[in-house]
Image (cartoon, rainbow, N blue to C red):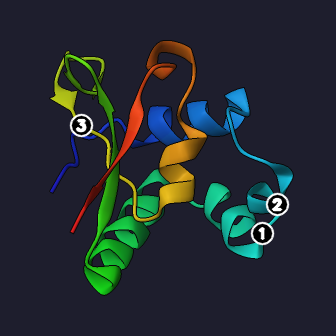
Amino acid sequence: MELSLNRDRVLSTCVDEGVNMGKGFEESPEFKAMIKKSAKDRYIYSVKRIADWEEAWSLKLNEGFVTTSDKEGNLSMPIWPFEEYAMKCIGGEWENSKLKKYI
């Protein structure tokens, strides 16, 4: 099954831009390990953690939720397994977004 999520853009951009997070989180062994994983492995990790913890995080804007798209224009709404990953992505085009927790 091909995953249509733009996984690489979401995590890689958030990490490269160094947005809104202190060094503590970025220096954690888990974060360091995950950033080196393939997009598919990060996707599997996220799905497992969301299921384990029974919660997910997203970013909300006034007009709706943040979205991203792939080269074909397919939209997706990124979700993260932990608040810290979502917080890492606040900035740039998502500067005014707020954290949203799903349980």
Camera-side residue: 11 or 90?
A: 90
On residue 5, the disc is none
Relative to 50, 45 lies left or right: right
On residue 28, the disc is 1
Relative to 98, 11 lies left or right: right
Q: Are the residues flagged by discs 1 and 3 in contact, CB closer than 8 Å?
A: no
Q: Are the residues flagged by discs 1 and 2 in contact, CB closer than 8 Å?
A: yes
On residue 24, the disc is 2
Mark 3 or mark 2: which comes first in sequence? 2
Residue 27, percent across and down? 83, 62
Assign a secondary structure to mark 3. loop
Three-letter code for the amino acid on which mark 2 is drawn:
Gly
Give the distance between the C-alpha atoms of the residues marked 3 and 2, in whole angstroms.
27 Å
Give the distance between the C-alpha atoms of the residues marked 1 and 3, in whole angstroms.
26 Å
Relative to 17, 93 lies left or right: left
Quadrant hosting residue 68: top left
* Quarter of the figure that contains the C terminus: bottom left
In the depicted structure, whether residue 74 falls above or below residue 12: above
| Viewer-nearest of discs 3 and 2 | 2
| Viewer-nearest of discs 1 and 2 | 2
Mark 1 or mark 3: which comes first in sequence? 1
Give the distance between the C-alpha atoms of the residues marked 1 and 2, in whole angstroms.
6 Å
* Quarter of the figure that contains the N terminus: bottom left
Residue 17, percent across and down? 69, 27
